[in-house]
Amino acid sequence: MPLIQLEKVTKSYQLGDEKFNALDEVSLNVEKGEFLAITGPSGSGKSTLANVISGLDRVSSGRVVVNDRDLSTLSDREISRFRNRTIGFIFQSFNLKADSTALENVTLPLIFLKMSPRERKARATECLAQVGLSDRANHRPSQLSGGQRQRVAIARALAAKPAVLVADEPTGNLDSERGKEILQILQNLNDQGITLLVITHDESVASRANRVVEVRDGRVKDRRQHS
Amino acid sequence: MRWRDYLGLSLRSLRRSKSRTILTVAAIVIGATGITIMLTFVTSLKSFVVQHFTQSGQILQIQVAQGRNLSFSGFTGNNNGPTPGAKVLSAASEAKVAALPHVTSVSATFSQGGYIEYVAFGSKKLQPNIVGYQVNAVIKPQLVAGRDLVPTDRTGAVLLTQDYANAMGFKGTGAGAIGKTIYLHTNYGYSGEGATLPSALPPQHQCAQNQRNCNGGPSSGLPAINLAARVVGIVSKGYANQTIFIPLSWSIAISNQSLPRFNCNQNGCGNNTGGWVTPSVASYIASNGGYNSLVVEVDNSANVPHVATQIRQLGFGAATGLSQMKQQTNAANLIGLALGGLGLIALFIAALGVMNTMVMSVLERTREIGVMRALGARRSTIRRLFTFEALVLGFFGGVFGVLLGSLLLLFAKPILANSMKGTTLPNFTVPIWLIFVVVALTSFIGFISGVLPSRRAARLDPIEALRYE
């Protein structure tokens, strides 16, 4: 069974008197360990697609099943737990807590996991090491470069050992060199078996994926598939 | 999420906006300081009143006097002569009162009716205000030095109030006066303690030829002497002011011996015939309206109202220390309510400040809320986090408010003591329970102020929150 399964998913918004379908009967399967790039023009529905898969948004109709769990049936408590344990988020603008160190930022999802301070410090240190930032653990975001900040964000996404990483334009705020570094880290994680969903406009990013889907007018089309 | 983590995250957020946090806490501190000072003032005043009435035994006492409209004044009431138609407080009435159930003992008091012209120590001459009381366990003046009068102190022993001792030149508690001899200078016409009255009435006092009896009142030509008195104790200023306390029997004797009458013979006083007669103590007491008051002690404070009613049924006025104490504590409660109300208004304004701070905080951290939701925070986690933050503001406001209030009271105490020298002041110490009450109150106010903003934070749509710029 696929890790992520979307069955005729529709997500509608009411815009004044008109109803607008951000996703229109989308069906999509993502296998475990896949690196899926989601492309498409602005406003096409790619972020909505990522949001319903990651449990941030509820569908209007259809079914989203991730890791054998039908997200539409989950309560706020359950879906929060799902996001905490199954999904790791990486944002374009990093979204780190400015008042916290790199280590403290990485521990944040582990706090929601009710892990003990000692355990979460050990896990966060491990994650920072994984992205090559052991020496920056006690630096605040303002003391880090853009690339380093995104690496902290990746470490934070990895902290709770999620099955899926959802990255929304992860290189969008970085120069090409730093972007390549980040993509390499993501590639390595995918090689280790983590399923990767990357929303991107950037063809060079999409080219690294083993599968690319394009979202246009709320519909999804498989553009390319590697083995 | 663990409570320790809520605290950690809250403190970190508050540290981030230091100025705003300090200002918000400062507003709560003002309210908490006010409440601390006001409630400490009231509770200290109340316990001071209760302690005063309990230690002096007045809580168990009833003051009995002529007339119905009587206010409890310990035992320093004034006797302005017999009230027309009123029952005289005689030895017989004392016995009747003493026989009432639950009455353990009775002490009579008798004030000097102006027969001492002045009180002297060295060159100092002071106005006399002399009260005699029956020395037993009922009346227990609060002493700051020396000892109380004892039953063997029949004449020549006195207690001075502290201000009286100070006026005589004995500073501080007036303890320097202990053992010293002062003099009670009688008016003219005193007949006791070796005073020699003239064998004939001086011409200016002679009565008309046909008048059989005429009074020899105070006047020149008649003796006035110094009655020596040794100071044995100093009474606290808070208990009584400007008074000399002497044994009851001596007080009556001085008054009685100040009123000798010259009995003229059948031919009138013009022939210098007849002689001086001092009235009997009993007749003197009766003619002067009896004792000033009786101080009655009851076995238990619960029986005080009942005994007072019985005394009133005997035709006397009765005022209880208990009702006086209740009046004073009620007055303190009223002051407390008024002042506490002001403190609560200040805290209410501070609560609006907390609410404003929290609303701003939610707005500023909208994106952060979105991130936390994406990372697995539940709505309830966000709600608790912001409520906790508001509660922490209230908690610190309360803690610093109590500290500031305690410090202000600490500094105010010596200033008050200095400006009210010699007066026993309540001990303005913040009670432990008040510390907890104020901190709990401000924390609760913080909590309540945080409820609406935190609900708003919890209801934010994570996607909208993540898009927030």
Image: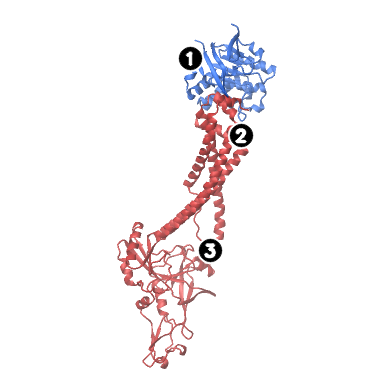
Judge whether A111 appears above or below A226 on screen. below
Label 2: chain?
B
Mark 3 highlights which residue? B172
- How many angstroms separate mark 2 from mark 1 (CA)? 41 Å
Whether the residues at callouts 2 and 3 have beta carbons within 8 Å, the answer is no
The three-letter amino acid code for the residue at tag 1 is Asp
Asked where in the image residue B351 lies, by quadrant, the reply is: top right
Q: Which mark is residue B16?
A: 2
Judge whether B291 appears above or below A159 on screen. below
| Circles 2 and 1 on the same subunit | no
Residue B304 in the image: state x and y as whole percent. Answer: 35, 60
Label 1: chain?
A
Residue B466 in the image: state x and y as whole percent. Answer: 59, 25
Q: Residues within 10 Å of mark 1 (few under 14, many from 20)?
A: few
Comparing A72 with B15, the one in front is: A72
- How many angstroms separate mark 3 from mark 1 (CA)? 89 Å
Question: In the rendered picture, chain B carries what hue?
Answer: red
